[in-house]
Image (spheres, coloured by chain):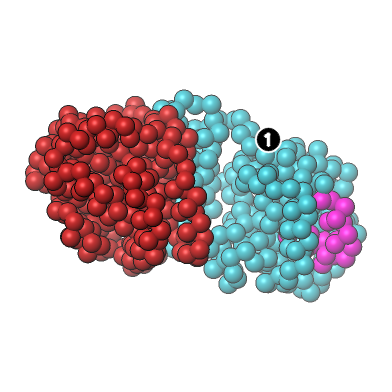
Chain colours: A red, B cyan
């Protein structure tokens, strides 16, 4: 049984199924049938082989898209998330004058999960939260080895996670560019939840500072069967890879299938199985060398 | 499609499945398989006939008990709920000097859902909440017709809901006894969630003021196929029936199969489909004549 898998995953995916279906324009009865269909899928996945977390996760999302279609159901949330993040950008830059500061800012971006209905909180509250979070220490901090790996690298692949959060990644990518010739930024190919897509990343400002590519996939993480060969080549060959957020971190088994060079994760542990796998507390910040 | 059924029911039952399984002593892998089994059951139920809410609800719980067994998984919550409620009893009695006051006190009992991990709240906070809630008006209040029906009644069947809440029902049952010869109090036959059982109701003090019977069933509500013939006879023949809480209210179609005499529900609308069915707002208090 994979270390990322717990029975809480069923509750989490069940809630996501409900959340996705709620956002569609289906009739109430169609929503019931669609949610039931997704519950059956979740049951099937967790009755089967429990050794590959990303396979379960990817297959769940692929089924969600069969039911909900191509539409960007979280467009509004993503737009608002970006707006809020841009309002915090000056403050973020103050904390990101050093490389370690910029890494922390990117990590806090993963903490401020704007995509979960917190819009009633004022910008002042967000500022306070940002300032508090950015002052916290990482529970795991592989910064010193990272600096060594960075010195040996000419190029970096940086894999984005959520909208909003991506604005803070802009700050870190800009800082990383002082150390290497090229940073390639990768994001989801099509809309999935509040994840930023490659197209949206270009619009956010990555256009000016990095080559932006799509993973070729709509899965919130890296599941090779769904990725483009271009992305897999870059994933394999980049001198250094930085993975943002839980979904990308939880793809580590997939990544190891093609990659043996230095790979780091920046994230906040937002669920009990991930916190347990990392040996940290729920809510802790982590900057960890994975390969 | 039954008016009580919405796609939010799947999210609610999925959460309950997770919650029940979490409380067992199963290994992590067994918990995953048990939760998956219950998710499959939920899917099956909502892929099928959607015309009978109680049938879906009852079949879900019967499957939960197959997986979790006979144990009283919520014993601790129920004990604490009763302790907290007894501490508020004097205050409750102050508000229950009139019959209408006692009905409101019983309704507020349904609001203070002690079984959902709110124990960190202080007794002072509970007192404040109680006083605030007891001062609210019912969104539907059939009190005047109730008084008319009460005058014509010699006996009442009063169907209990949760532990904790049942302490406030004690106050109302005592008041009702001033108007009729006999009040029969019914409760679940075996432990299910934070619902009070007939045995527990006896221990709470109903022993002194009423005849206490079991529904014969472990379903949180009334599903005739699982009820004893003794209970069904009393349900059919009582001059007046008072149903506490959502589960009992949502059993109205079952009750109508055997009963045509005055039947009332006292509850707080705690889920969107129930609020919609009643034409009230989520969170509203209701005292409604159903038959």
Residue B65 picture quarter = top right
Badge 1 marks a residue whose secondary structure is helix
Residue at far bottom of view = B144
Q: Is residue A93 visible?
A: yes
Task: Please provide percent x and percent y for residue B30.
Answer: 43, 28
Q: Residues within 10 Å of mark 1 (few under 14, many from 20)?
A: few
Task: Please provide percent x and percent y for residue B9.
Answer: 48, 54
Is A112 left or right of A142, judged from the image as shown? right
Give the residue number, with chain letter if any, for mark 1: B76
The stretch drawn in magenta includes residue B89: yes
Is B82 left or right of A128, judged from the image as shown? right
Tell me the magenta residue range.
B88-107
The stretch drawn in magenta includes residue B288: no
Residue B105 picture quarter = bottom right
Residue at 87% over, 48% down: B209
Locate the C terminus of chain A and report the quarter of the image it occupies: top left
Residue at 78% over, 42% down: B83
Locate the N terminus of chain A and report the quarter of the image it occupies: top left
Task: Please provide percent x and percent y for residue A236.
Answer: 13, 36
Residue at 60% over, 59% down: B270
On screen, residue A290 above or below A192: above
Task: Please provide percent x and percent y for residue A52.
Answer: 27, 32
On screen, residue A74 above or below A17: below
Residue at 65% over, 47% down: B118
Q: Is residue B39 visible?
A: no
């Amino acid at each position: 049984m994979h270390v990322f898998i717990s029975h809480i995953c069923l509750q989490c995916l069940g809630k996501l199924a409900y959340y996705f279906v709620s956002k569609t324009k289906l009739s109430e009865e169609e929503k019931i049938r669609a949610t039931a269909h997704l519950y059956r899928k979740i049951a099937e996945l967790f009755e089967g082989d429990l050794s590959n977390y990303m396979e379960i996760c990817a297959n769940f999302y692929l089924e969600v898209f069969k039911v909900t279609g191509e539409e960007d159901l979280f467009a509004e949330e993503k737009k608002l998330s970006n707006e809020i993040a841009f309002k915090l950008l000056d403050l973020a830059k103050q904390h990101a004058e050093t490389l370690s500061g910029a890494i922390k800012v990117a990590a806090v971006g993963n903490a401020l999960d704007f995509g979960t209905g917190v819009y009633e909180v004022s910008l002042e509250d967000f500022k306070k939260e940002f300032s508090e979070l950015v002052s916290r220490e990482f529970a795991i901090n592989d910064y010193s080895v990272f600096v060594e790996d960075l010195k040996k690298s000419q190029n970096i692949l940086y894999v984005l996670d959520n909208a909003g959060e991506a604005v803070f990644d802009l700050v870190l990518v800009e800082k990383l560019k002082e150390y290497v010739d090229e940073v390639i930024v990768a994001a989801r190919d099509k809309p999935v939840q509040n994840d930023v897509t490659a197209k949206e990343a270009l619009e956010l400002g990555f256009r000016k500072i990095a080559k932006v590519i799509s993973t070729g996939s709509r899965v919130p993480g890296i599941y090779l069967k769904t990725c483009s060969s271009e992305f897999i080549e870059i994933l394999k060959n980049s001198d250094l890879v930085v993975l943002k957020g839980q979904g990308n971190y939880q793809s580590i088994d997939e990544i190891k299938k093609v990659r043996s060079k230095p790979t780091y994760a920046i994230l906040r542990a937002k669920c009990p199985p991930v916190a347990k796998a990392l040996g940290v507390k729920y809510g802790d910040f982590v900057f960890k060398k994975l390969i």
